[in-house]
Amino acid sequence: MAPTFETSVVRPAAIAAASLALLASAATAQSALMADLLRDVGQVEQKLVALARAMPADRYDWRPGEGVRSVGEVFKHVAADNYLLSAGTGAAAPAATGINAEDYNTAVAYENRTLDRDAIIAELEASFAHLRKAMSATTDSRLREKVSLFGGEMSIQQLWVLEVGHIHEHLGQSIAYARSIGVVPPWSR
């Protein structure tokens, strides 16, 4: 049977069009994912920074028990990991931080610096600006790219989901710390 116009041109064109539509749909879903993650990061950032500002300077050394982070140490930890996880995608942390994705100890050293309340808040804000910039620069095609971090391999998409979960964890911790010392989160008033 000789090929017809339909079997030689129309069907392959329809298959190609359907394939392109599926690819476009997948790219849209990935773009929607990054938009959702960025929106969530912005909300957590607003709450963490507001909470950091609401905490009295004399309570930044308070900790609920021995062997756990203090109020100020939690905020420095969030800032350190905002830089560290971004660096894991190739968005190098600012040189002044000393943070290098190849060496987790650089993030620990960053966290262990002695800073006053205002400097901690400034570091927290700068780290979120860096995080948002790194996430915004992540193209859809890079989401499935594999990176090495913490001795394992994960996709950049998995890394960003890890980051968002991480900041939520420490937002909850900070809310509990605040309420323990009589500070009401500003958005709850």
Image: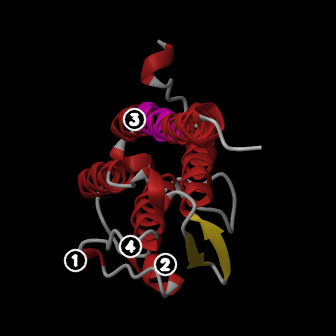
Residue at (37, 78) in percent of width and height: 99
Q: Which mark is residue 42?
A: 3
Can you say whether 134 is above or below 165 in the image? below
- In the rendered image, residue 123, in percent from the top left (x then y), is placed at 29, 58
- In the rendered image, residue 38, in percent from the top left (x then y), is placed at 43, 39
Q: Nearer the viewer, mark 1 or mark 3?
A: 3
Amino acid marked by disc 2: Val
- Provide the residue designation for mark 2: 108
Amino acid marked by disc 4: Gly
**Label whose residue precedes the other's in the sequence (3 or 2):** 3
Q: Is residue 34 magenta?
A: yes
Quote the CA–CA distance across marks 1 and 4.
17 Å
Of 91 and 182, the residue lying toward us: 91
Can you say whether 109 is above or below 138 in the image? below
Mark 2 neighbour density, 10 Å: few (under 14) some (14–19) many (20 or more): some
Quote the CA–CA distance across marks 1 and 2.
14 Å
- Provide the residue designation for mark 4: 90
Check contact, mark 4 vs mark 3: CB within 8 A.
Answer: no
Check contact, mark 2 vs mark 4: CB within 8 A.
Answer: no
Quote the CA–CA distance across marks 2 and 4.
19 Å
Amino acid marked by disc 1: Ala
Of 134 and 150, the residue lying toward us: 134
**Label whose residue precedes the other's in the sequence (1 or 2):** 1
- Provide the residue designation for mark 1: 96
Quote the CA–CA distance across marks 3 and 2.
24 Å
**Numbered disc 2: secondary structure:** helix
Mark 4 neighbour density, 10 Å: few (under 14) some (14–19) many (20 or more): some
**Numbered disc 1: secondary structure:** helix
Residue at (63, 46) in percent of width and height: 169
**Numbered disc 4: secondary structure:** loop
Residue 72 visible, this orientation: no
